[in-house]
Image: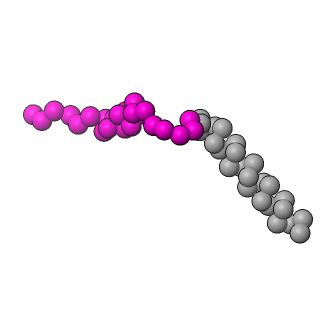
Amino acid sequence: MAPAPATSAGLLRFFEEETLGIKIGPKTLLAVIIAILIICIVIHFSV
């Protein structure tokens, strides 16, 4: 019987690697994207 494949499939290694650049959480990133989207909509309709 063959061994079961790894469930993480290398995704764990990605988070262990040290990366350069700004480290930002997913909730913060989502909030920034929504804020920029709202600002763009307001500017678009105010002109």
Q: Which residues are magenta?
A: 1-23
Q: Position of residue 29 (x, y in %)?
A: 63, 42
Residue projecting furthest to the right: 46
- Tell me where residue 19 sits by quadrant: top left
Characterize the magenta stretch by its predominant secondary structure. Answer: loop
Is 11 colored magenta in this rendering?
yes
Residue 15: give x, y in percent of width and height: 42, 33
Please name whichever residue, 41 or 19, is drawn nearer the observer in this view of the structure. Answer: 19
Q: Nearer the viewer, residue 37 or 7?
A: 37
Estimate the x, y position of residue 37 in percent, counting from the top left: 73, 55
- Name the residue at the front extreme: 20
- Residue 4 located left or right of residue 31: left
Is 42 or 7 nearer to us in this picture? 42
Which residue lies at the image location 89% right of the left edge and 69% below the top edge? 47
Q: Is residue 14 magenta?
A: yes
Quadrant position of the N terminus in the picture:
top left
Residue shown at 78% from the left, 54% from the top: 38
Q: Is 6 in front, or is 32?
A: 32
Q: In the image, 11: left or right of 2?
A: right
Image point 26% across, 34% down: which residue?
Answer: 6
Q: Residue furthest bottom?
A: 47
The location of residue 2, given as percent across then percent down, is: 12, 35
Identify whether 8 is placed above or below 46: above
